[in-house]
Image (tube, rainbow, N blue to C red):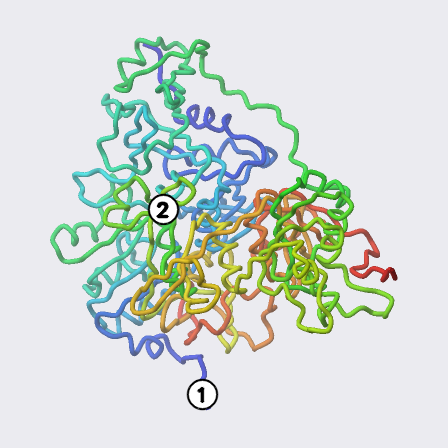
Amino acid sequence: MKPGKVYPTALRAVEDVFDGAVVMLGGFGGPGLPQSLVKALIEQGARDLTFICNTCFEPKPDEHDVARLVDHGRVRKLITTFIGRPNQEMPALDLWRRGKIEIEMVPQGILAERMRAAATGLGGIFIPNGVGTVFEDGQEKRTFDGQEYILATPLKADFALIGAHQADPLGNLTYRLTQRNYNPTMAAAADVTIAEVRELVETGEIDPERVVTPGIYVDRLVVAERGI
Amino acid sequence: MAERLSRDLIALRVAAELRRGQVVNLGIGLPTLVANYVSRDRGITLHSENGVLGYGPHASDETQDPDLINARGEHTTLLPGGAVISHNDAFGIVRGGRLDVAVLGALQVSEKGGLANWLVPEKGLGSPGGALDMAAGAKRLIVITEHTNGGAPKILKECTYPLTVAHRVNLIVTDLAVMEVTPEGLVLKEIAPGWLVEAVRELTEATLIVSADLKEMDFGFPKEPPVEKVCSSAAEAVADVFDGAVILMDGFGGLGGMAHYLMLALRDQGAKELTVVGNTVGIARVSAFGAPPSPDLQAIDHSILVETGQIRRAIASFPVSPSPSRPSAFEGAYRRGEVEMELVPQGTLAERLRAGGYGVAAFYTPTGVGTVVAEGKEVREFNGREYLLERAIRGDFAFVRAHKADTLGNLVYRGTSRNFNAVMATAADITIAEVDEIVEPGELDPEAIITPGLFVKRIVQRPPGFSPFQPIVKE
């Protein structure tokens, strides 16, 4: 029999994250951020990771997010959209200046759509985002109906760590309010998707019309060790 | 010298630019204050990058929900009729041209409509966040900023910082003035109380063209009639369908998910030379999809529009009857050379519609490589695999079949009636929803809304006792 998707601990669920892996991390602010999985990854010890996530601010004492992993020296590269306002200084920026970390800044709409292209098996997409800015540098451009577009390429990952509200043992997921954010897109764009949920319910308990991430995208499930 | 306007007054002046029914995104900082003047009864939908549509005032300690934040990470509230969607959908809405107004702050803004607000070059690295996407995608871009930064002008001839967007700013509102970017240059339209043109010019690097009807800044809101989406009948909802229109309609061939009431109204309305885009072009009558409850009845499908000669062309994945002995009306017309047909694989059709709805011009898909579908299309290799370039599809109208709507146009579907309807709803200029029930805003669960109301222009309820079958008329 195929082993089930439900893992006893977050640490077991992230056991095989390897050095140099590309990892998507869901969440926008606190909602939808899988903090138990981040905590487990710190304990697990993988290094030289590339993280794809919306933001990287500074480590907060009460929150396990990517900034914590950066602080622990586990992150080699960040692909992200926001590391503070123009007048703000963040630790990642300092590390970048000292050459300790690579950072690729991406506008949010491009990031979301590139991950979605990977999720849906497209080879590339022509989108208008970034035209006329530094984000078109080095990119292939093409004109359709008089408007310029950039060829954006799919962005996939080895692992996606996502946070959700409820799961059933098949991996069907629901999100509460703004927990949803990037999570459904990331869930579909990685080879191995690991979901941390508040609550595990029986198969059939989730209204089929309310499932946002179907179980086919979810490989592993853990129940949050702390609030998410 | 007169006082400069307070931050609140600048925000109030920007709020007066917004119009009923608009979808609006507010950036971080000064733009955030505009939300204080967007009251619920103004009928404006505030859009947030992280997937909130229709957020309200900041949450108090009592009303705070840890799972509900805005793009600034603050706890917010949802107004009745609000919806929560994914980040990806939130940006699809912007790219797809559904965001009416973006209000952004500025480090620099130019007389040519350029905006720089994400990177101070000396820092080396900046955060684009969602600003570039909003600036490029919004139909109208309003910049709200203090006129100067510690005495240094921010309204320039050219931006020297890396751009957020080039040539897209429409209006600049500051603590001294309201300026419009026009092809002729930057026009000074309104000036803060007590200020003289020369004093404003001194604090502006850009060349100001003084409007012939220069006014003192006006903070009044326009009086506007409510936006009414609910139509009293399908006939009213389809009245403006014009000859030659492209109409997205179908669902998935069968009874669930097909807008029969709208289709009947279109037949009676009589528009001709139509292009229909759908999974099928009417096979319900001739397949198990439309099995009638009695032999003297048949399902309503596209055939009713084929028989009247209204359909000229179809773009579909399944236009041919599964039963050779029971050809569809469209097949017959095709064999007689009366109609044209473009065949599209089902997944490609869905993706082309999604591209149309979400502002993607074209995409490379592996589907169809090496088949007849690839004829005349670009083939390109990525990482050792071949892909076809497929273009977006948009419609003038979409006829969508949903289960319930609220009066703002938010839709939920039942069972498999979601199918193509949800994606078609995004991809037309005028989306008309046929529903079983219309409810008040707030009655649909915000997390269950599949099609946000901003996509839906008109709503019509199926009449009580409406049947998706009609009697067979013997010739």
| A122, B83: nearer the viewer | A122
Residue where numbered disc 1 is placed = A2
Residue where numbered disc 2 is placed = A149
Horizontally, residue B243 falls left or right of residue B285, namely left
- Label 1 marks a residue whose chain is A
Type of the residue with mark 2: Tyr
Q: Quadrant of the N terminus of chain B?
A: top left
Residue A116 place in picture, x, y as percent: 41, 60
Q: In which quarter of the image is the C terminus of chain B?
A: bottom right
Q: Is mark 1 on a helix, strand or loop?
A: loop
Whether residues under marks 1 and 2 lie with C-beta atoms below 8 angstroms apart, the answer is no
**In the picture, residue B385 is in which quadrant?**
bottom left
| B289, A10: nearer the viewer | B289
Residue B458 place in picture, x, y as percent: 67, 43
Residue at the extreme left = A98
Residue A141 place in picture, x, y as percent: 31, 47
Specify few, some or many for label 2: CA neighbours under 10 Å numbering under 14, 14-19, or 20 or more. many
Task: State the CA–CA distance, disc 1 to disc 2.
Answer: 45 Å
- Point out the frontmost of discs 1 and 2: 2
Type of the residue with mark 1: Lys
Specify few, some or many for label 1: CA neighbours under 10 Å numbering under 14, 14-19, or 20 or more. few
User: Looking at the image, is mark 1 or mark 2 earlier in the sequence?
Assistant: 1
Which residue appears at 58% of the width and 36% of the height?
A: B21
- Label 2 marks a residue whose chain is A
Which residue appears at 52% of the width and 65% of the height?
A: B345
Q: Residue A111 carries which label?
A: none
